[in-house]
Image (spheres, rainbow, N blue to C red):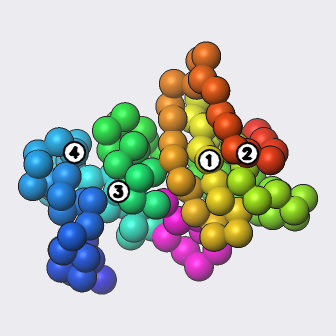
Amino acid sequence: MNIEQIRDMYPGSVVNKARSQNDAVTDEAGATFGDYLIGAKKADDVIFSKHAARRIDSRQIEMSDEQRQRLNAAADKARGKGLKESLVMVDNMAFIVNIKNNTVVTAVNDTEKKVFTNIDGAIIG
């Protein structure tokens, strides 16, 4: 399945809204980082909520495959410890992950002097 087919399946998605509002950073083919997140998902990978995908696009957060693997490994560790809402730090990026739903609910790439609330644990990945 390609990006255009995914867009067609979710016409009201944040990816299409951002594209229509012309506020998302895109590559030469017009794909946003959120598009890559959708396409790169594996069965046990965390997923990104619409809110998180918007934050990733607006903050121009880029993740390597290795960073993505570390995010997934940290979410697995949090699950193993019985956490429910976890702060996961990967390099200079912070992710709030709902462990039960395996979903990143928000993302930040400038973590200096930030306050994170409603979490029950933190994992540095």
Report the magenta residues as a range.
41-48
Residue 73 in sight here = no
Residue 81 vertical placement versus 24 (above, below): below
Q: Label 1's element?
A: strand
What type is the residue that disc 3 sits on? Gly
What type is the residue that disc 4 sits on? Ala
Q: Is residue 69 left or right of residue 80?
A: left
- Residue 29 image offset from top left, x and y in percent: 15, 57
Tag nearer the camera, 3 or 1: 1
The alpha-carbon separation of the residues under discs 4 and 3 comes to 9 Å
Residue drawn at x 49%, y 70% as measured from the top left: 41
Label disc, if present, on residue 24 of the rendered structure: 4
The alpha-carbon separation of the residues under discs 4 and 2 comes to 29 Å
**105 magenta-colored:** no
* Residue at the spot of label 1: 96
**Is there CB contact under 8 Å for labels 2 and 1?**
yes
Image quadrant assignment for residue 14: bottom left
Residue 23 vertical placement versus 76 (above, below): above
The alpha-carbon separation of the residues under discs 1 and 4 comes to 22 Å
Q: Label 3's element?
A: helix
- Looking at the image, is mark 4 or mark 3 earlier in the sequence? 4
Q: Quadrant of the N terminus?
A: bottom left
Q: Main secondary structure of the magenta part?
A: loop
Residue 68 vertical placement versus 93 (above, below): below
Q: Label 2's element?
A: loop
